[in-house]
Amino acid sequence: MTDVAALTREEAAAELDRLAREIAHHDRLYHQQDAPEISDAEYDALKRRNDAIEARFPDLVRPDSPTHKVGAPAAAGFGKVRHAIPMLSLDNAFADEDVHDFVARVRRFLKLGEDGAVEIVAEPKIDGLSFSARYENGRFVQAATRGDGAEGEDITANLRTLKDLPDRLHALFPPEVLEVRGEVYMSRADFLALNERQAERGGKTFANPRNAAAGSLRQLDPKITAQRPLSLFCYAWGEVKGYEAATHWDFLEQLRDWGFPVNPERKLCKGADAVLAFYRDIGERRAQLPYDIDGIVYKLNRVDWQKRLGFVSRAPRWAIAHKFPAEQAMTVLTRITIQVGRTGVLTPVANLEPVTVGGVMVGRATLHNEDEIARLDVRDGDTVIVQRAGDVIPQVVGVVLEKRPADSAPFAFPHTCPTCGSTAVREDGAVAWRCTGGLICPDQAVERLIHFASRNAFDIEGLGDKNIRAFYEEGRIRAPQDIFRLRDKDTGSLTPLRSKEGWGPVSATKLYDAIDARRTVPFERFLFALGIPQVGQATARLVAQHYGDLPTLRAALSAEDVGPDSDAYKDLINVETIGPAVADELIAFFREDHNKQVLDALAADLTIVPFERKDVAGSPIAGKTIVFTGTLERMSRGEAKNRAQDMGAKVAGTVSAKTDLVVAGPGAGSKLKKAEELGVAVMTEDAFFDMIGG
Ligand code: IVH
């Protein structure tokens, strides 16, 4: 390469032009596709050369000069879109019985009695990628992926390239706002043809139509999306203003009239038997459908009933996905190994000779626990049947005994931790062996860190399991608080991250920035991130709602005398759905000295935002603690509880001095008496509904 000092003006201009394009290309690969082609060192060399030339010929600095864009993370991927109404997922049904239970649950919740028609729309569950498309006054304005349900990626430009999506609604008087939701997919024929084309050109091929659809839609360059054969079906709505459907069926017909593709394989059914008949019919024709489906979705037809049912956690109560049986394959199990999880549970894993199951390569499968191994009598060297059901980890479902090697021996489940050597225990009634090593067990420590940084917890981009494992081994991160001290510690380190193989100043800074972006965290997320056994997202949310903030929770649970008879304990198990088992885990966690240190350190480095009650302006019951007792006549207990929580109230199971209101129906007994003794306000169901507005 010519020395910068020896470059002519013309050569310099030409080289700056080349460098601008080359650096932009690598920026794109790095920030947007997470697929760099050159090392950070090589990238830095390009930048340095560019800088040197610009320094010598300042008047040649280009408007698109890479120096103007140093470390511009704004270019990193897609913009974010917050969903005005969250995009939900669905609960699953696997057996007919689950479907009967679903319908029975709906009946109970709505107090419909045994007979009385329940109309349900059944439609195929498309195996694709869900999206939400927003129309304002009939014009397409924005689209987003589902993301985590609350926030997705802006794919407006990409979705616009799909010929199936109308740019304008076919309507004289379109609604003011319409968010249409559905699934983008690739037909099987299109998928095969695309893979062939890609292979010919030496491009990337895809494992299955779903991956192909996802990979094609999530392209930063919409021109690429435009060349991919993507289709879509619409089946749900988000925010809507100026239109209201009485039933889901009417809504689908309206969508079709507005110009959206709606799956023709849909049926309005009456009751569980009718939807099951549809399920079997489609099941038989599944292989002939032009696209992949993984089940049938059942949705309650009446929208007013949907509203009353509402949703739990992340799935509506008024819909369910009935999955098709999983696809299976046969292969050889080379060896059973033991994996140690976040809470110390020892999980046996089947290491397999790789095999494709339903289009996906499988090399490992879970064996769950000691009993499952005994039940299957599965051994090293066995030929086994593995199956994959949706996103679930593949499982071993059976052994082909005729193929068992003559010298095989039953598997002996270890009684010590294979990682740290600590004693393992299997508690009474438990199915799992647990390592007692706690955080001295590297596997447990690492799994807790992985959970801490994961998507539904701190959601730190670039801090996935691979990096956490490496950072743990190198001693960079041993405890959660180390994550937030990484940048500072690294600056003065003799072995800084930036000089580690595969890293450089750009990628290290990118990681530190991603960590910094998470220094402010909602209390419920923080609580979930701690990885307390039995405290999942829903429980974390309830606990956060109940206590409000971390200091209050810690003060309540870490006192020495939180025994089963203490007020603090009763207050905790009085939170609906928190039982003694969860309460014990919470108390044990907040009492443990090591955890106290972690919490102190995190509290010092982070801003933990207290639980934000919903916007319940004007709600007469916001912040109040309510107990329902006796028989309710206008709604089921579940529905009443939902309504109250939506309006900002806490719902408790027992009456205490902290109760603000008891809603009592016929047959109310001891709770009503207690309320009277304590002087707590009591209301009838009717009075309650009048108060909250019917
Ligand atoms: S309804 C509240 N209908 O399945 C409405 N979802 O497992 C929720 N899906 O996230 C979705 N086909 O991506 C619905 N006909 C269909 C569907 C469908 C596929 C996907 C969707 C959803 C996931 C839930």
Image (cartoon, rainbow, N blue to C red):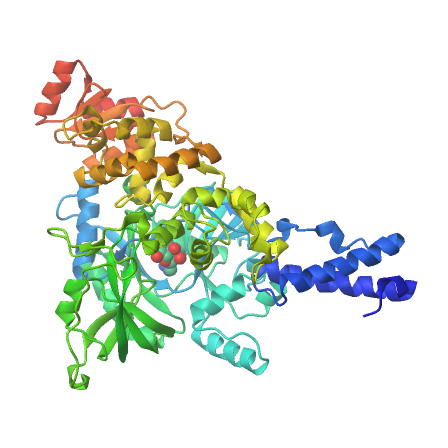
Q: Residue furthest front?
A: 494
Q: Nearer the viewer, residue 261 or 557?
A: 557
User: For the point 43% across and 33% down, which residue is it?
Assistant: 603
In the picture shown, does residue 375 fall above or below 100? below
- Residue 431 on image: x %, y %: 16, 56
- Residue 399 on image: x %, y %: 18, 77
* Image region (quadrant) for ligand 1: bottom left
Q: Is residue 549 visible?
A: no
Q: Quadrant of the N terminus?
A: bottom right
- Residue 135 on image: x %, y %: 53, 48
Q: Is residue 685 visible?
A: yes
Q: Quadrant of the C terminus?
A: top left
In the picture shown, does residue 537 fall above or below 398? above
User: For the point 38% across and 75% down, which residue is it?
Assistant: 359
Q: Nearer the viewer, residue 384 or 247?
A: 384
* In the displayed structure image, the side of residue 601 where residue 397 appears, left or right: left
* In the displayed structure image, the side of residue 56 where residue 666 appears, left or right: left
- Residue 648 on image: x %, y %: 34, 28
Q: How many marks?
A: 0
User: For the point 20% across and 38% down, which residue is it?
Assistant: 584
